[in-house]
Image (cartoon, grey):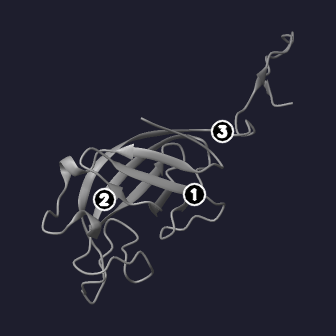
Amino acid sequence: MIQAITETDLTFYLQTEDNRIDTSVTSSQIRHLLKFTNDLSGAVQYAYSTVNLITERYTKFEFTYNSTPDVYTGKVDFKPSGYYQYEVYEVSWTGTVSISVGNAPVTEVDVLSPPASTKGVVKGLVTKGKMYVADKTGTSQVQYTQHEESKLRNYIYYGQ
């Protein structure tokens, strides 16, 4: 499980080479599109990692916190805190890799046209898992306070 904190940058390592789909190109022509889905709200966020370090044993992923997420630059904003599901999709280029508008797919079902060597193609899902995002400031968590029981009705008070 990946551990993260809201409003901070995120670095983690995953094994992707064991499930590599497109073996006809080198690792330098592979990037990974990550899909993050919040378990509570169902909100979906896509992003390419700012670092593309693929080794035999692991792939290093880095994302930058920004209140305005951007799929191409690796800017993410994990709010609300809580559990997320992540999915990692392999994207392959036959020519020059360009993570930019019109050259890199923005979802796992995005097909860029017309086909070209500079346009990435989603090859498929290589891994998935869970991520827990803790709240940096504690403001998103509700704190319950117990009050003396009323003789007429029971009430639950929360907050301050």
Amino acid residing under circle 2: Tyr
Report, in whole angstroms, how far the alpha carbon at label 3 lies from the one at label 2.
27 Å
Q: State the residue at coordinates (46%, 51%).
A: 37
Q: Position of residue 53 (x, y in %)?
A: 36, 56
Residue kind at label 3, given as amino acid type: Asp
Residue 27 % position (x, y) = 25, 63
Residue 129 x %, y %: 36, 41
Estimate the x, y position of residue 8 in percent, counting from the top left: 63, 48
Choose the circle earlier in sequence order: 1 or 3.
Answer: 1
Q: Which residue in the structure is indicated by mark 2? A: 89
Q: Earlier in the sequence, mark 3 or mark 2?
A: 2
Query: Element at badge 3?
Result: loop
| Mark 1, secondary structure of its residue | strand
- Please indicate whether residue 56 sits to the left or right of residue 73 in the image: left
Q: Residue at x 63, y 45 (%)?
A: 6
Residue 107 in sight here: yes
- The answer to whether one can see residue 156 in this image is no
Q: Give the amino acid type for the residue marked by disc 1 in the picture.
A: Thr
Residue placed most toward the observer, 96 or 148 = 96
Instruction: Count residues near mark 3 (Cα–Cα under 10 Å), then give few for <14, some for 14-19, many for 20+.
Output: some
Task: Categorize mark 2 by other alpha carbons within 10 Å: few (<14), some (14-19), many (20+).
Answer: many
Q: Secondary structure at mark 2?
A: strand
Q: Out of 94 and 78, give the one closest to the viewer.
A: 94
Give whichever of discs 2 and 1 has the lower sequence position.
Answer: 1
Quickly name the residue at label 1.
64
Tell me: residue 155, above or below residue 138.
above
Mark 1 vs mark 3, foreground winner is 1
Residue at the far left: name it: 24
